[in-house]
Image (cartoon, rainbow, N blue to C red):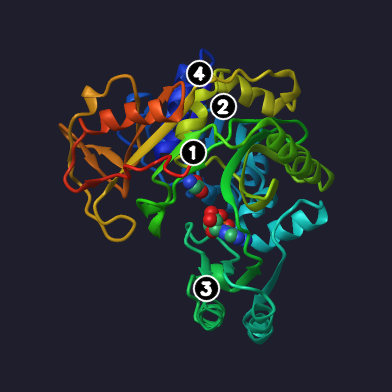
Amino acid sequence: MKILILGSGGREHTFAYKIAQSPLTSKLFIAPGNAGTAQLGTNIEISVTDFEAIKDIVLQEQIEMIVVGPEDPLVRGIYDFFKSDEALKDIIVIGPSKEGAQLEGSKEYAKEFMERHQIPTAAYQSFTSDTVEDGKLFLESLKAPYVLKADGLAAGKGVLILNDIEEAKTELENMLTKQKFGKASEKVVIEEFLDGIELSVFVVTDGKNYKILPTAKDYKRIGEGDTGLNTGGMGAISPVPFADKEFLNKIEERIVKPTVKGLQEENIPYKGFIFIGLIKVGDDPKVIEYNVRMGDPETEVVLPRIQTDLVHIFKHIDKETLEQITLEIDDRTATTVMTVSGGYPEAYEKGKVITGLETIEESIVFHAGTKQDENAVITNGGRVIAITSLDEDYKKALKKSYQNIEKLHFDKMYYRKDLGFDL
Ligand code: AMP
Ligand code: GLY
């Protein structure tokens, strides 16, 4: 089977790594890819949202399956684009329909979906520029901290958590009337603050059946001890040690089942991944967000633990026969540590030569923001290289990742040395 992966990060390199291992894969393409994916398949220099260019490549190369990495093309409707085109409609698309992708594309949509299907989440109300004053009154009815969320996609930056009521009111106004997050904050969801520890659960679904993948936890802040600015993710660990059987059972019964059933009842085509961000409040799971794709860097720890052929899983998703599969999961713990460019998540430089890649032993190198230059691999983004290791427990796995990172070098390289500090 000829397969195209859309995206260019560590997540997509990990997909490429698993898909390239499958005997069902005959040829692999990645658009646009990075220096890591170039070693496993053919990179194609097109944007993930240029559907016409994607169509041309798919027809020209007779691609039979596309695996969509990031949310942007999903929210813009790449699934529907394929399914409504006579020449493309039989191509397998791993990813939800445009409607399904609204679970990530609009916080309000996700909240209303959860309300309709009695899925536990924080209490909320949403506001627009016409109802700023109502929003301020609603804030006054809540206790600090105040959680303000831009309704639309804001590249992971659209959530503000504020302790001061006056600051919360000002920011609400900035979001609604001064377009703090552009169009994404034309509507704002204000919600109850949930106090607890976070984890993520990943599900694959064919729209009727589902399989729960390993749990993971990422480290979002740039600084040690979870301080400083939010990033795309500085590392991840799978499984999450505190997610025991009983807790996972609650997640399945109260959240996963009603989510998949809700999609089916509402006739929302959904053949792909659901990434459920959760907070454990006391002993109970509550949803903080849905994403309609895998996480990055969570993919770098979740997929290496899945022993079942990924392409085989995708074919069952397409045929809506996911119930026929038994997932084989590696019992070991996986950890990944992300190296980033100095300055990230604010301004940083690109084009730095990366050395030491060939010296990594007993860990897996996943490229994120990298590019193959004439005779070197160079940095090409904020997050650069993730080093994934597997071992009996997270401490041993992390030790391997950290030992290997010491052999890596690029100018102004930074990484967090404290992953797992909270476990
Ligand atoms: P989101 O983009 O919705 O995942 O929010 C980003 C981050 O904000 C989450 O990972 C949480 O750490 C935090 N967060 C979001 N919603 C809440 C909430 N209701 N209570 C507490 N923290 C939250
Ligand atoms: N690591 C968080 C995300 O992929 O959204």
Residue at disc 3, secondary structure: loop
- Foreground of the two, 411 or 368: 411
- Foreground of the two, 392 or 95: 392
Dot 3 or dot 4, earlier in sequence: 4
Q: In this picture, is 5 found above or below 96?
A: above
Disc 4 marks a residue whose amino acid type is Thr
**Marks 4, 1: nearer the viewer:** 1
Q: Is mark 4 within 8 Å of ligand 2?
A: no
What's the CA distance linking mark 3 and mark 4?
Answer: 51 Å
Q: Position of residue 277 (x, y in %)?
A: 60, 48
Dot 3 or dot 1, earlier in sequence: 3
Instruction: Give the crowd class for mark 2: few <14, some 14-19, many >=20 residues within 10 Å.
Output: some
Residue bearing mark 1 = 298
Residue at disc 1, secondary structure: loop
Dot 2 or dot 3, earlier in sequence: 2
The tag on residue 389 is: none
Instruction: Give the crowd class for mark 4: few <14, some 14-19, many >=20 residues within 10 Å.
Output: some
Residue at disc 4, secondary structure: loop
Dot 2 or dot 4, earlier in sequence: 4
Residue bearing mark 2 = 64
Residue bearing mark 4 = 25
Q: In this picture, is 344 found above or below 45?
A: below
**Marks 3, 4: nearer the viewer:** 3
Which of the image's four quarters has the N terminus?
top right
Q: Is mark 1 within 8 Å of ligand 2?
A: yes
**Marks 2, 4: nearer the viewer:** 4
What's the CA distance linking mark 3 and mark 1?
Answer: 29 Å
Res 193 quadrant in image? bottom right
Q: In this picture, is 416 found above or below 204?
A: below
Please report the residue visible at 40 percent of the width from the left and 37 percent of the height from the top. Answer: 10
In the orientation shown, which residue stands out farthest toward the top?
23
**Marks 3, 1: nearer the viewer:** 3
